[in-house]
Image (cartoon, rainbow, N blue to C red):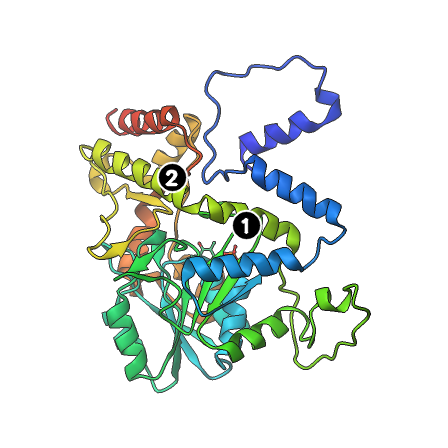
Amino acid sequence: MDPQRLSSLKCMSPQKKNRPSHQESPESFIVFGAPQIEQDEIDEMIATLKSGWIGTGPKVQQFEQAMRVYKNAEYTAAVSSCTSAMHLSMIAAGIGPGDEVIAPAMTFCSTINAILHAGATPVLADIDPRTMNIDPKDMARKITKRTRGFLPVHFAGRPCEMNELMALAKKHDCKVIEDCAHAIETEYEGKKAGTFGDFGALSFYVTKNMTTGEGGMVLAKRKEDIDHIKVLALHGMSKDAWARFSDKGYKHYLVTHLGFKYNMTDMQASLGLHQLRRLEHNWQRRQHIWNRYQRELADLPITLPAEPAPDTRHAYHLFPVLIEENAGMTRDAFMEEMTKQKIGVGVHYLSIPEHPYYHDHLGWNAEDFPHARHIGQTTVSIPLSAKLTDAEVDRIIETVHQILQR
Ligand SMILES: *Cc1c(COP(=O)(O)O)cnc(C)c1O
């Protein structure tokens, strides 16, 4: 746990209350990806707790509906995480043992795990070094007669090359499941990310553009798919728990599928409803911070992220910079300095083959994905949360200058 979260936990313990506060320095730690929780969420959560129903119920339905409208999606199902959303989408897509799914070599591990948990075989494609998104040309090279699906990731909130990707999917009769963990606000030629493919998976993990603590959502094109996913997300039961325990009397449920425990609760949806209301406002705030970084870090010997492509909308989820040879220091040394200056940083991501599990069990080698490896070894994300104050953004910009100009 990072130092600030730890110390705020300590503050809540009764023993500490009467002790004098010790060595609080004027500048506190800027937590990477700090969530913005406001009074509306707190009030809604308390109302839910007092309502007598905290499981999967009316607020989850309301949240699914609100997100369906926001995303202009046909159907939505709230679940426990983006990981479970991708896993269930794989199953609903009919992808399983013997099938290959193409995914980027640089992403969060759970993109790949969702394919493995469905029993299918992940096949990696390298990324484009400038956009950091999966390269459709490398995808085309990786297609075999067993390829059944694509799992693109809209990295950092920038949409993938959806025209090329969807044309490839159509040509090879592949299902498309979009990992939209960074891409709630993302659009490509006026269409929302997550609505191109058969399925889209959203994340409401604590560091994402909006949060429910833990949580996710499936977007789907077809009613039979979303119905299947809703059954799978709650033990494979034919009726959900809310209906089962409602005041209309006990209803028998029948287990019709081998399901999972992947449902979202009304406590989580209580946060999500208000986070979604502030989503666009927070997007503007992050866009402002992004633009400041692009302008005010331009003179440094680092590679800044690609600006959004024309006719697209970037979700501004991450601001990844590359600390390459000409920076005069390693990426890891830069991260250490930032942490010393009380600024939280992140790495998104080490390339997938560099993790021992995938290297050992799937035989992948980082050399085979040179762009993913290079980015994975040089990238560092600086804070881009809507919660940052102007003074904090000033401090981040100044600190990056100081560290690199030494
Ligand atoms: C965070 C993240 C996930 C996983 O999301 P969870 O909701 O934590 O399961 C998947 N893919 C990417 C690209 C992510 O950043």
Residue type at numbered disc 2: Leu
Residue 273 bears which disc, if any?
1
Residue 94 in the image: state x and y as whole percent.
50, 82
Who's the residue at 61% across and 49% down the image?
270
Check disc 1: other Cα within 10 Å, few if <14, some if 14-19, many if 20+.
many
Q: Residue furthest bottom?
A: 145
Relative to 164, is 129 above or below?
above
Q: Nearer the viewer, mark 2 or mark 1?
A: 1
Residue 246 in the image: state x and y as whole percent.
76, 64
Residue type at numbered disc 1: Leu
The mark that comes first in sequence, 2 or 1, is 1
Residue 129 in the image: state x and y as whole percent.
24, 56
146 vs 377, nearest the viewer: 146
Check disc 2: other Cα within 10 Å, few if <14, some if 14-19, many if 20+.
many
Left or right relative to 118: residue 125: left
Q: Secondary structure at mark 2?
A: loop
Left or right relative to 377: residue 213: right
332 vs 84, nearest the viewer: 84
Who's the residue at 50% across and 40% down the image?
35
121 vs 246, nearest the viewer: 246
Quarter-wise, where is residue 260 in the image?
bottom right
Residue 122 bears which disc, if any?
none
Q: Quadrant of the N terminus?
A: top right
Location of mark 2 (residue): 384
Left or right relative to 291: residue 193: right
